[in-house]
Image (cartoon, helix red, strand yellow):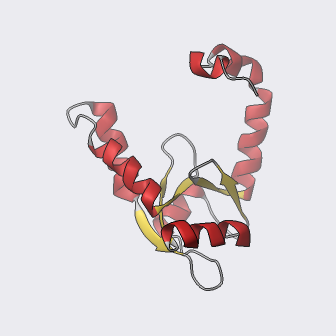
Amino acid sequence: MPARYRDALVDSALGNLVVTIDTDAPCLLLYPLPEWEIIEKKITALPSFNTAARRIQRLLIGHATDVEIDANGRILVPPVLRDYAGLEKKVMLVGQGKKFEIWSELGWLDQRESWFSNTEKDVEEIPVELQQLSL
């Protein structure tokens, strides 16, 4: 964990984090514990008789694992999550506002290239809220 993020995470979450899988991409989601608790409440409130909602509940909550930042700024990711994301020696930590994504370096580079090459298709699928956003 880079020092500038580590310090902020220790201050805001006492170094307590939750890591789980991303259901749409072969990466992991890393949340400070207070942010995860908000997400977890929303996920558990989804209707359990809805098949898609139940799938999300099983995958996100079922894989959620508490982790802590150690004195050297590292976290220990369980093998099942490392395998899911294909994590080996080099990983990419990608900030996403209130959470991070953890990618294998190769997975990130491949996915990023795919996003760059599919921009025309993505423009057609932009939600109305994003179309109104001015950057």
Q: Residue 70: where, in percent of width, then height?
A: 57, 82
Going 63% across and 22% down the picture, which residue do you hit?
130
Who is closer to the viewer here, 59 or 86?
59
Going 58% across and 67% down the picture, which residue do you hit?
9
Going 53% across and 70% down the picture, which residue do you hit?
77
In the current view of this chain or complex, which residue is farthest to the front? Answer: 11
Residue 51 in the image: above or below residue 107 = above
Residue 69 in which image quadrant: bottom right
Q: Residue 34: where, in percent of width, then height?
A: 43, 59
Who is closer to the viewer here, 3 or 76?
3
In the current view of this chain or complex, which residue is farthest to the bottom? Answer: 71
Residue 72 in the image: above or below residue 91 = below
Position of residue 11 in the picture relative to residue 104 (left or right): left
Q: Residue 81: where, in percent of width, then height?
A: 50, 62
Residue 93 in which image quadrant: bottom right
Q: Taking the image as drawn, is residue 78 in sight? A: no
